[in-house]
Amino acid sequence: MKSDIAIARDIKLTPITELACSYGIDEAYLEPYGKYKAKLNYDALHDKLKSKPDGKLVLVTAINPTPAGEGKTTTTIGLAQSLNILGYKTFAALREPSLGPCFGVKGGATGGGFAQIAPMDEINLHFTGDIHAITTTNNLLAAMIDNHIFQGNELKIDPKKILWRRSLDMNDRALRRMIIDAGGGGEYNSSFIISVASEIMAILCITSDLKDLKERLKRIIVAYSYDNKPIMAGDLNAAGAMTAILKDAINPNLVQTLEHTPVIVHGGPFANIAHGCNSIRATKLALKLGDIVVTEAGFGADLGAEKFLDIKCRKAGLKPAAVVLVATVRALKYNGGVKKDALNIENVSAVKEGLANLAKHIENLKKYNLPVVIALNSFDTDTDAEWAEISRLCNEMNVGFAISDVFMRGGNGGLELAEAVLCAINKPSDLKLLYEDSLDIKGKIEKICKEIYGAGSIRFADDAIIGIKKATDLGYSHFPVCIAKTQYSLSDNPKLLGRPTGFEVTIKEIRIMAGAEFIVALAGDIMTMPGLPKIPAACNIDVNDEGQITGLF
């Protein structure tokens, strides 16, 4: 089979203005970025469509993955194509790819095979510049903090209590520790974070409009003063310039799949570090434009789906009609104890062991009172005996089940899944959140850890206890909680695969995202600046003499 980028290059795309028109979007609402991608004028278009009933929202999530991922984005794209084949006006709503994984292990985030969004090389690299804008905005704020100290420090910022870090959309472990010299006694320890972990990315994905964006940027806590008062971006008069950089980035982007299904792509927070969902603006606009909207939340359901439901849906008033839980035989064997280099060998007993992980995710999603469909993303190394075990569990747990072959066959490979989803979205559903706003911060963390992860106990480090008290004293205890932890396990230990029980989760640190309006709890050894593997994907990326990029996947 051809590479992803070769498959994408063979497809003749529809000019974005024509695609938009065919789905009811007048050219007046577009700002094209070349022939095949465009910014959407959200405010004008959403205002025009405000009286139209929303379509039905389908969330795609997954079990705990192998390091290569389980095809969640591919399934999302393929399912949207399949629903369009069946005659339903369907949009997909996705996050933007980060350059970190693109050049690292996982590759890009535009799907794969015949279930891709395009132009895949442009989307995976610079796209419309949104993440670059976030990076610049983040670093402008960092520069203004240091400059304020250098110029006399009127706000009495304590350099030892500066929280704001510079960002770069790249995996670079050398930037995890550094010393900043702001002058005037302003030397302090700091680090870089990857741009998709920046609070500014989270704010972009939660904000409602430019006015709300500016107000949220003002509320970012960047440091504390010598007398322990919070210093915010608004105190530095930084929010106006930050909003100016983000003025265009706030608008969602329109592209298409290889089968010309429309896709709104916007925002890209990681789900192991941040809340892992595309922007509320993108999802809401898609719901006005389509009869069905298929969206995804990053990594396993213990991270992405929990945060999608308890943070994004809480903030936006969204109510999914159904959840698609992506599983693979490979990931089940991985969770059943099989090493990465043996995942292609039939092992029915390991699949049976790994089914405990799938069962836990099903149980978790049912807590939210939503219909669940299992999408088994097929590989040519799967066997009928392995599939039969998965089908058996789904029957026992009374959830939908379908084999998905969208990677090899595009929309036609997902028709069985589409039918199962159509059945699910017509069942009764009424989203029930895991916790109330009124529950205190510690209580919210404990509820997520015990009910979603299956923890037996939670240990709060001294720094976390101090952070919880500080957040409570500042009046933020009503915020939802975003737990940053490993994506490879239900626990905070990546080596505890399957369905561990009775384990202890360690909450090391609490970070207040006052602009994004949630509390981040760092669990276990979580890195906000990833590193590159021994042989990065970047080693295989090149440009030929005709200017065509090769090696992207």
Image: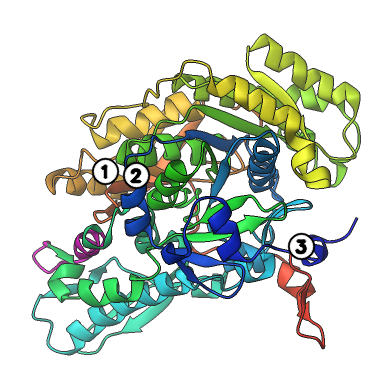
Left or right, 66 with reference to 245 = right
Check residue 465 in the rendering and tell me which mark sits there, or answer none.
1
Magenta range = 213-229
Instruction: State the image quarter where residue 90 is shown.
Output: top right
User: x, y percentage for residue 394?
Assistant: 69, 17
Quadrant in which the C terminus appears? bottom right
Q: Earlier in the sequence, mark 3 or mark 2?
A: 3
> Label 2 amino acid?
Ala
**What is the CA distance from the residue labelled 3 to the residue labelled 1?**
50 Å
Task: Name the mark on residue 8.
Answer: 3
- Are the residues flagged by discs 2 and 1 in contact, CB closer than 8 Å? yes
Q: Quadrant of residue 88?
A: top right
Of the pair 369 and 411, the residue shown nearer to us: 411
Q: Amino acid at mark 1?
A: Ile
Residue 532 in sight here: no
Q: Quadrant of the N terminus?
A: bottom right
Q: Which residue is mark 2?
A: 461
Q: Reply yes or no: does residue 225 show up in magenta.
A: yes
Cβ–Cβ below 8 Å for labels 3 and 1?
no
Compute the Cα span from label 3 to label 2.
Answer: 49 Å
Among the two numbered marks 3 and 1 on one chain, the one whose residue lies closer to the N terminus: 3
Above or below, comparing residue 214 to residue 141 in the picture: above
Can residue 339 be seen here? The reply is: yes
